[in-house]
Every structure is written in C-alpha cells, then in structure tokens.
Image (spheres, rainbow, N blue to C red):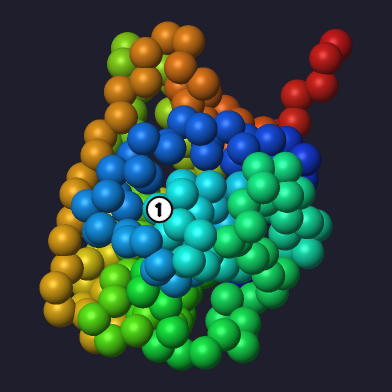
Amino acid sequence: MAAGDRYVLGYRQAEQERLQGQAEQLSDEAARLFDEIGVSDGARVLEIGCGPRGCLDLLSTRVGESGRVVGVEISADVAALAQGFVTERGLRNVEVIAGDALSSGLPTGSFDLVTARTVLVNIPRPEDVVSQAVALARPGGAVAFHEVDWAAVMCDPPSHAWTTALQLFNAVNEKNGNDYYLGRRLPRLLRDAGLVDIHVHPIVHVHPPGDPRRNLVAEFVDNFRERILALDLIAERRPS
C-alpha cells in the first residue's frame, strides 16, 4: 500500500455498492442536517467527494430549479456512476465533476453551502479539504461535514473476533494517515480554517440485529484484506 492513499477505502465495486446503500441508510440524518442549515431555493451547493450518489438528490430537491448542485469526485469511474445516478433521477440542476476538490478550478467564494459526508476520516491531511471547503463557500455561507468519531464503536456482548477486526482496521488507517476518531477535533479544524459560528450535533447509532450497518467493521476489514496481509498485521489462514 502506498503511504497516504487519497481515499483509503478505494474504488472497488463492493465499496461503491456499500456507498449506494449508505446513501439510503443515512438519508434521514443528511436531510435533518440540510434542513437545520436552511438550504434554500436557488442556492448553489457543492458536495466534495460525492461518490456514486452521496447527497446529490437530497440537495437537488432543496435548491430547486433555480439552484445548482455540483458534486466533485476524484475517481473518474465513480464520477461516471454519479453522473448515471443524476441522469437516471432526472436531476437537471446537478453537475458532476471528475477531479480533485483541492484543485477543482471552481471559483472561490461562490457556494452558499459546501458539504461532505464521511470524506475527512478516509483521507490523510483532512485539514486541507476543510480549508478548501471554507475557501469555496461565500462570505456568510455555510460549511457542513457529516463525519465520524469511533469513540462509541463497540460490541456487546464483547467479541474477540470483532475487537481484532477493529484493531486491524485501525492499524491500516494509522499507516495511511487516517483518523477514524476525527469527529472530536473537527470543530478545531473548522476554527483553524477561520470559521467562527460552529455547531456540533453528535449522533450515536445502535445497530440492532439485521441492520446492514451492523456489519460495517467486517466490510471494512474485507476491503482492507490485501493491505492487512501486506503489512504483516495477521497471518492468512487457508482452508485445510
């Protein structure tokens, strides 16, 4: 694994399918976030790291026909998936750009809202994206991140296998420069980027049996399988 992969979870098909499911699973939370901000008709909104779907449909509804939503996605293949989603849903006020949000060429100070969901925890140097988001927002506009802090990620009853999986996942993240406990320092990153009116709304999930997000740690470890083996974090056991 190259040190400092730009998006640690990668772009394989299984990850894109997980992100499609995540868009549905977290849609209510995202909707509440945008409603609290007050995304208005005619607004210009940028979603950084929109993935194959992100919040593009939720934002499209809120800005209306006179507004504009731009999704930026660093992977050209994933951006094509997002464009397919936009076309399928008939979201005529949404544009998808394949490119790096840090060098997108978008004009500074031109968006009423700049947002991203679970992007900062998956990249090294999240402060760079925070600073860019602040720069792209207009004076008096808003910047909103829907991010993660794994302080409350636990298994009850305790499971040795689950604990081992979590340790392996965190080891790969540490090697890559990612921080899945970023949520607690995000307000500081926002202040350091020049924002002054900062609001934090913590959400704790308790996933019951049958909830698809109950298997999230196992899915992440499966994603990281080759990296875990390459880093000699655990030996591979082959069927006898």
Q: Residue at x 14, y 73 (%)?
A: 197
SS at circle 1: helix
Q: Quarter of the image holding residue 12?
A: top right
Whether residue 111 can be seen here: yes
In the figure, is residue 205 to the left or right of 17?
Answer: left
Residue 207 vertical placement versus 43 (above, below): above
Near-viewer residue (98 or 220) = 98
Where, quadrant-wise, is the N terminus in this rendering?
bottom right
Residue 182 vertical placement versus 213 (above, below): below
Q: Position of residue 202 (x, y in %)?
A: 21, 45
Near-viewer residue (127 or 217) = 127
Near-viewer residue (126 or 201) = 201
From the image, tell me which residue sits under label 1: 62
Residue 131 vertical placement versus 53 (above, below): below
Q: Position of residue 126 (x, y in %)?
A: 44, 71
Q: Residue at x 25, y 58 (%)?
A: 38
Which residue appears farthest toward the right when viewing the image? 240
Whether residue 227 can be seen here: no
Q: Residue at x 18, y 56 (%)?
A: 200
Where, quadrant-wise, is the C terminus in this rendering?
top right
Type of residue at label 1? Arg
Q: Quarter of the image holding residue 100?
A: bottom right
